[in-house]
C-alpha cells in the first residue's frame, strides 16, 4: 500500500543498494517497479507458504535480507520478515494491522535479529519535509485518484478507496 511504497522511496533516498518489494497485490508491485524497486515477489496470504516465499525472496534479493520493513503488521507479514532477515539483521515493524500477532520470535532471537517498532514517527517531520522539498522523494506518483469535497464526491472517494484495484492514495481537493 502507500506506506510500503513510501518506505521504498525512503530506502532509495537513504541509499539502500538493493530493494525487493513483497506484496499480495500485483498492481502495487507494478507501482513499486515504476518507483525503482530492484525486485518483486508476489506472495499469498497463507501462512503455510512462508518457507517457499522466504526462499523466493532470498533468491530475488541474492542473499538473506539485511533490513526488512513490515508495512502491513500481520502475523504472516511479520513472520515472513523475521524469517527472511539475516542473522544480526533488523526488522522494522511499521504497520499495525493486528493488535496481536503470532510470530516465530525464538528462531529470530537465536539469530540475533533486532525488531524495531516505528509508528508515531516522532521527530521525523522536519526530515520528511526536507526530502519532499529537495525532490529526493516524490510522492506524487502515489496519488492515483483525486476528488472534490462535496458529499457525493466524498462518498465516491471512499467507495473507490475500498474497491482496491489500481488505487494507491486518494486525495481530496478543497
Image (tube, rainbow, N blue to C red):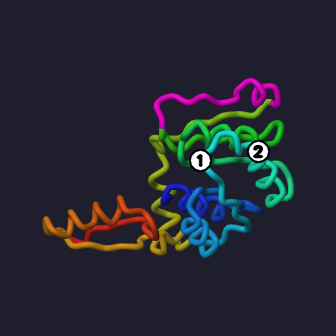
- Work out whether mark 2 precedes mark 1 in sequence or the reverse, and give the earlier one: 1
Q: CA distance from mark 2 to mark 1?
A: 16 Å
In the picture, measured across the screen, residue 163 lies left or right of residue 99, that is left
Image vertical order of residue 100 relative to residue 90, above or below: above
Helix, strand or loop under label 2: helix
Q: Which residues lie in the magenta part?
A: 98-111
Q: Which mark is residue 45?
A: 1
Helix, strand or loop under label 1: loop
Q: Which residue is mark 2?
A: 84
Q: In the picture, residue 38 is in which quadrant?
A: bottom right
Image quadrant holding the C terminus, namely: bottom left
In the picture, measured across the screen, residue 163 lies left or right of residue 44, that is left
Q: In the image shown, does 154 or 14 lie closer to the viewer?
A: 154
Residue located at (84% from left, 57% from top): 59
Q: Position of residue 107 (x, y in %)?
A: 78, 28
Look at the image and say whether residue 70 sits in the magenta stretch.
no
Image vertical order of residue 84 relative to residue 155, above or below: above
In the picture, measured across the screen, residue 66 lies left or right of residue 72, that is right
Look at the image and say whether residue 99 sits in the magenta stretch.
yes
Count up the numbered dots. 2
| Marks 2, 1: nearer the viewer | 1
Tag 2 and tag 1, C-beta contact below 8 Å:
no
Q: In the image shown, does 134 or 39 lie closer to the viewer?
A: 39
Pointer 1 local density, CA inside 10 Å: few below 14, some 14–19, many at least 20: few
Q: Position of residue 21 (x, y in %)?
A: 66, 60
Q: In the image shown, does 23 or 124 lie closer to the viewer?
A: 23
Q: In the image shown, does 77 or 149 lie closer to the viewer?
A: 77
* Residue furthest left as drawn: 151
Residue located at (45% from left, 73% from top): 140
Residue located at (72% from left, 43% from top): 50
Image vertical order of residue 27 relative to residue 24, above or below: below
Amino acid at each position: 500500500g502507500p506506506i510500503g511504497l513510501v518506505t521504498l522511496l525512503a530506502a532509495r533516498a537513504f541509499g539502500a543498494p538493493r530493494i525487493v518489494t513483497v506484496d499480495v497485490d500485483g498492481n502495487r508491485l507494478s507501482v513499486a517497479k515504476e518507483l525503482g524497486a530492484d525486485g518483486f515477489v508476489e506472495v499469498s496470504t497463507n501462512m503455510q507458504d512462508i518457507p517457499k516465499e522466504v526462499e523466493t525472496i532470498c533468491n530475488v534479493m541474492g542473499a538473506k535480507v539485511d533490513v526488512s520493513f513490515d508495512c502491513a503488521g500481520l502475523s504472516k507479514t511479520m513472520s515472513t520478515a523475521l524469517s527472511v532477515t539475516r542473522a544480526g539483521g533488523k526488522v522494522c515493524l511499521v504497520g499495525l494491522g493486528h493488535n496481536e500477532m503470532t510470530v516465530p520470535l525464538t528462531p529470530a532471537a537465536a539469530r540475533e535479529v533486532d525488531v524495531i517498532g516505528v509508528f508515531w514517527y516522532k521527530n521525523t517531520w522536519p526530515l520528511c519535509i526536507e526530502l519532499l522539498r529537495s525532490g529526493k522523494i516524490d510522492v506524487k506518483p502515489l496519488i492515483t485518484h483525486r476528488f472534490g469535497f462535496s458529499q457525493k464526491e466524498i462518498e465516491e472517494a471512499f467507495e473507490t478507496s475500498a474497491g482496491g484495484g489500481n488505487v494507491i492514495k486518494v486525495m481530496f481537493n478543497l
